[in-house]
Each structure stands twice: as C-alpha cells, then as structure tokens.
C-alpha cells in the first residue's frame, strides 16, 4: 500500500524563476506567479508547507490592463482617521509604482496567514529590466496568454 508523502520545508529544493511581464495582462501575471510562489507547479505540493519557488518579475511598468480598467479601476487607502480615504487611479499607479500594483495583486491571491507572508517574501518585482539577482541564475518562466 502506498503512503502519502508530506513535504517538509527544510527539504524543499527551491529554484529561482524570472518573468518578463511585457505586454501581458496584470491578472494573468499575478495568478501564475502566485501559483509558483505557493508551489502548485510541483508534485510535492502540500497546502500547509511552503513548497514554492522564488520569482523575479521584471518590466512591471510594461504590463497591461485589459478593457478600460486603466482609467476606471481605483486604488483606495484609508489612514484610519475620519475623512482619511485616499483614491488613486491605476493609470497613475502604473506610472509611479507598477511593482506595487503587481505585488498587491499577487498578495491577494496568497493565503492570509503567516505562511502567505513567507510566500510573499519570495516575490521580487522590478519596474525595469535590471535586477540584482544574477547570482541566483534564474530560469525563464513563460507566462501563457501574453499579447506579444
């Protein structure tokens, strides 16, 4: 009789992947990056263990939003004080801090607990094509469904 093998976080072999987000929709990049961060692309996936890999996303400033979301979609932030709500359109967010837009989308797709925080720590997002992780020798990860 076969037994189920439970992964242990110390024995997980972690790889580094690099994703070029040029001309790919934000949601498509975020969902596939979140799956790799969780480890769902591996056969040893265990829900209660962090089996995911590291992901570097470059060219986040060249991601696209489909439809009219670039103008219509808003980012809200509240300071906690009365009247302290702040609103910013995604058009402005993509110009100023597109890496934050991707990080926020990916974070919403990860578990809302300490395990999700560990997984989120393995995401590295950069606006341009330069990144300081050459020493890790990242392997290119192709995102399906891009508009190249």
Image (cartoon, helix red, strand yellow):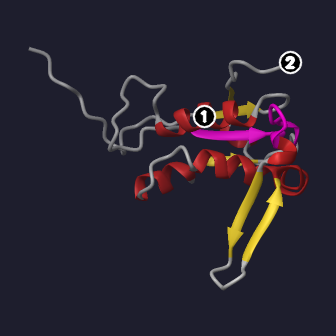
Report the residue at 56% width, 51% height from top: 120
Q: Which is more toward the observer, 42 or 77?
A: 77
Marks 1 and 2 sit apart, C-alpha to C-alpha, by 19 Å
Residue 148, position as x, y percentages in the image: 86, 18
Name above or below for residue 11 compared with residue 80.
above
Image position of 69 (left or right of 51) = right
**Mark 2: secondary structure:** loop
State which region is magenta.
Answer: 54-69
Can residue 60 be found in the magenta stretch?
A: yes
Which residue is the site of mark 2? 148
Vertical order, 26 against 132 (above or below):
above
Left or right side of 127 for 143: left
The N terminus, quarter of image: top left
Residue at 14 percent across and 16 percent down: it is 2
Residue 85 seen in this snapshot: yes
Where disc 1 sits, the SS reads helix
Q: Is 148 drawn above or below residue 131 in the view shown?
A: above
Are there few (<14), some (14-19), or many (20+) residues within 10 Å of tag 2? Answer: few
Q: Is residue 127 visible?
A: no
Q: Quadrant of residue 83?
A: bottom right
In which quadrant of the rendered view does residue 137 lie? top right
Badge 1 vs badge 2, beta-carbon distance below 8 Å: no
Reading the chain from its start, which is encountered first: label 1 or label 2? 1
Q: Which residue is mark 1?
A: 31
- In the rendered image, residue 75, in percent from the top left (x then y), is placed at 74, 58
Percent position (x, y) of residue 99? Answer: 77, 50
């Amino acid at each position: 009789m076969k037994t189920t093998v439970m992964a242990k976080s110390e024995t997980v072999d972690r790889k580094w992947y690099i994703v070029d987000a040029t001309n790919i929709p934000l949601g498509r990049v975020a969902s596939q990056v979140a799956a790799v961060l969780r480890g769902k692309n591996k056969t040893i996936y265990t829900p209660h263990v962090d089996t995911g890999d590291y992901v570097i996303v470059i060219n986040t400033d060249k991601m696209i939003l489909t439809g009219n979301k670039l103008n219509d979609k808003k980012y809200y932030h509240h300071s906690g004080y009365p009247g302290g709500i702040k609103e910013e359109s995604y058009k402005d967010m993509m110009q100023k801090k597109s890496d934050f837009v991707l990080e926020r989308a990916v974070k919403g797709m990860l578990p809302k607990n300490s395990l999700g925080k560990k997984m989120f720590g393995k995401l590295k997002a950069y606006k341009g094509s330069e990144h300081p992780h050459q020493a890790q020798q990242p392997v290119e990860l192709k995102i399906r469904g891009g508009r190249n």
